[in-house]
Image (cartoon, grey):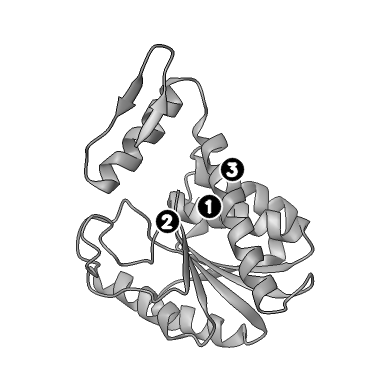
Amino acid sequence: GLWPDTKCLWLVTLPFGEEVRAVDEKAISMGLPGVCLMENAALGLTDVVCEELEKRGAGPGSVVGIVTKTGNNGGDGFVLARHLRLRGFVPKVAYCGDRSAAKRETDAGINLTVLEGMAPDAISDVADGAQLARVLAEWSDAVLLVDCLYGTGLDRALRPDGVALVEALDAAPQPKVACDLPSGLDCDSGVPLGAAVRAVRTATF
């Protein structure tokens, strides 16, 4: 990847996951806050999701399910939900984790708090894969599901609870749009780390 500097271009020749982190760190070192990077990434994700909705003839008022966890991939999902709502869609967010333990000072935590203030009824708390499957079954009116579970930071085999979440999302009948990469894939090798979501489209940054 290339990025501009005041005097030169920096060339990165790293595994993809490390390269993504290096670009983020470089931008932050130049004074761009991480929360701004998340906002920009999620705006791009919002455009991709809206394109997919348009392809399916789904206009404003359509329901979009977003499956999130606690990290930055989930943060992208919280920003996505906010922007979909502003564009007239109906986002429903499954939060896979304990919201009472969320670190509210992180970029993802800040955006979770903003979403709670804007649309508290849009968020469903999910404890495990079985509960996620039940929530997704209740979202039969959703046109699309957006996979914001695991991102480029996943670098080891999923634990059984993670496999259960990924399998529950993958089993839902709606087409999935993935954020960063389909959850469960190793971003350097493309090999599933125990399970993986099959997405019709991926928005990567």
Q: Which class describes the residues within 10 Å of circle 3: few (<14), some (14-19), or many (20+)?
A: some
Q: Residue at x 44, y 72 (%)?
A: 127
Which residue in the rendered view is the most extreme toward the top? 7
SS of the residue under disc 3 = helix
- What residue sits right under mark 1 in the picture? 76
Q: Is residue 31 left or right of 143 when viewed as pictured?
A: left
On residue 26, the disc is none
Q: Is residue 49 left or right of 130 when viewed as pictured?
A: right
On residue 39, the disc is 3
- Please name whichever residue, 126 or 30, is drawn nearer the observer in this view of the structure: 30
**Can you tell which quarter of the image residue 158 is in?**
bottom left
Q: Residue at x 61, y 70 (%)?
A: 52
Q: Foreground mark, 2 or 1?
A: 2
Q: Residue at x 44, y 13 (%)?
A: 6
Q: Is residue 23 above or below residue 116?
A: above
Q: CA distance from mark 1 to mark 3?
A: 7 Å
Q: Three-letter amino acid code at disc 1?
A: Asp
Quadrant into which the N terminus falls: top left
- What residue sits right under mark 2 in the picture? 180
**Whole-percent x, y for residue 70 in the image:** 45, 55
Tags 2 and 1 touching, CB below 8 Å? yes
**Whole-percent x, y for residue 122 in the image:** 68, 66
Q: Is residue 142 above or below residue 121?
A: below
Tags 1 and 3 touching, CB below 8 Å? no
Q: Three-letter amino acid code at disc 3?
A: Glu
